[in-house]
Amino acid sequence: MITTVVAGNPKPASRTLDAATVVLERLTGRAPDHVVDVIDLGPGLLGWGDDAVSEAVRTVAASDLVVASPTFKATYTGVLKLFLDQFATGDGLAGVVAVPLMLGAGPAHALAPEVFLKPVLVELGATVPAPALYLNDKQYSEPASTEVWLARWRDVVLGATASLQEGTRS
C-alpha cells in the first residue's frame, strides 16, 4: 500500500497537514509515503498542464490517502478544490481509498466533511468506505480524538484498500 496525505490548507505546514499525517499514521501504523501540501503547488493550480501539479495528481492517483482541509465557510477550502479539479470526473481517483478529514474549531461544522468533501472524492472515483472524520483543531493530536473512529473503521478502510489492490492484480 502506497499512502499519501493531501492537505488543502492555504497555510503551508499547517495543523491540517499535521492532523492528516497523524490520522494516516494511526490508521496504518507508519508514516505516509508521500505528502502533498497543496498550497506548495502555487499558481500552477490555476491552470492546466503545470508539471508540479501533474506530478502531484499522478502521485495521489496511485495512492491510498487521507484528504484533509480546514473548515472554511462551513466547507473545504478553495485551494483544495483547485487541486481536486485537476482530476478527471468519474475515474481520476479510481482505485484509491480515501479518508475525508476536516479540522474545525468546534462542533458546529462536524458534518462538513461528510456532506461536502466525501461526495467530491466519490465523484472523482475514490472509494470512501467509512464516514468522514471531523476533528477539533486543538485536540486532533490527542489519541482520544480518533480512538472511536479508528476502532470502528480501521479494518473497513484497510480491508477496502486490500480488496482494491487484489482487484488490480487479477
Image (cartoon, rainbow, N blue to C red):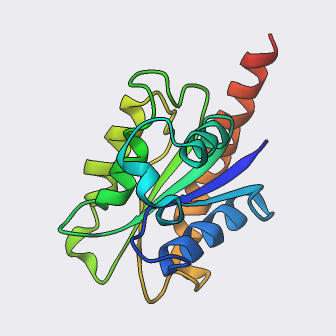
Q: Which of 72 and 29 is in front in this view?
A: 72
Quarter of the view holding residue 84:
top left
Measuring 49% from the left and 45% from the top, which residue is drawn there?
Answer: 130
Q: Residue at x 61, y 35 (%)?
A: 61
Work out whether 27 lies above or below 125: below
Task: Give the total number of marks visible in the rendering.
Answer: 0
Q: In this view, does 91 lie to the left or right of 5?
A: left
- Indicate whether 11 appears above or below 86: below
Residue 137 quadrant: bottom left
Q: From the top left corner, tell me how far across and down residue 94 is, in percent.
A: 55, 25
Quadrant of the frame with the C terminus: top right
Residue at image coords 74%, 18%:
168
Quarter of the picture holding the N terminus: top right
Give coordinates of residue 3: x percent, y percent.
Answer: 71, 50
Q: Which residue is drawn at 56% across and 67% down?
A: 20
Left or right: 72 in relation to 35: left
